[in-house]
Image: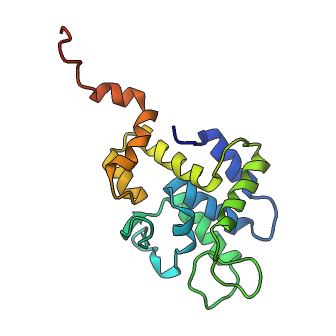
Amino acid sequence: MPVRLTADQIERMLAASLDGSAHELRNRAMLLFLARIGLRAQELTQLMLDDIDWGAGCMRIRPGKSHRERCLPLPHDVGEALSAYLLRERPRSSCRAVFLSTREPYGPILDTSVVSRTVRRAMNRAGVVGIPAAAHALRHTAATQMVCSGASFKEVADVLGHASLATTAIYAKLDLATLAQVALPWPGARS
């Protein structure tokens, strides 16, 4: 079973990200990208300003692990958090990466462990403990929410960038009600 957070844990973690630190808007925006869209930490660090199409409300995710580029909608709350970070907190820099390091010279985040530490700190402040692989757990959470909201495995695979539906099938274990509806009758069973 994939490790995931409950909706309450996600909301507590997001609230805890607004901690008064100098980087709270960046951290909140990063957490929302991971929790709502299910981006990989690497995809988050590779997101460029030019990848955001504000007019169309979508973003381009560059080829990564799956070697496929994809265009995803930008959810309203994620867009608002990103806008707040860009307008009020992001340091001036010629670097086109959306999320910058917090120390001069401000440049791209080069190590995904920065993302994982950001997630872990927010979880700890929210009292969410015992969740391994913190950043990836948010990806599992987003996928689980999509499945439980009725998204098909193909739709979930497209959002997550899975090359194979077999990879997405792990989330089938989470939605037993839907599985029961699509299950074929046992051969030889009486009607």
| 161 in relation to 56, above or below | above
Residue that appears at 47% across and 47% down: 143
Residue sticking out furthest to the top: 190
Answer with left or right where residue 135 lies relative to residue 170.
right
Residue sticking out furthest to the bottom: 94
Answer with left or right where residue 124 lies relative to residue 145.
right
The percent coordinates of residue 12 (x first, y second) are 70, 45
* Applied colour scheme: rainbow
The percent coordinates of residue 183 (x first, y second) are 28, 26
| 106 in relation to 181, above or below | below
The percent coordinates of residue 29 (x first, y second) are 62, 64
Answer with left or right where residue 113 lies relative to residue 67.
right
Q: As rendered, which of 10 and 5 lies closer to the eye?
A: 5
The percent coordinates of residue 125 (x first, y second) are 79, 50
Q: How many marks?
A: 0
Q: As rendered, which of 18 and 174 lies closer to the eye?
A: 174
> Which quarter shows the C terminus?
top left
Residue that appears at 43% across and 34% down: 173
Residue that appears at 63% across and 52% down: 133
Residue that appears at 68% across and 87% down: 92
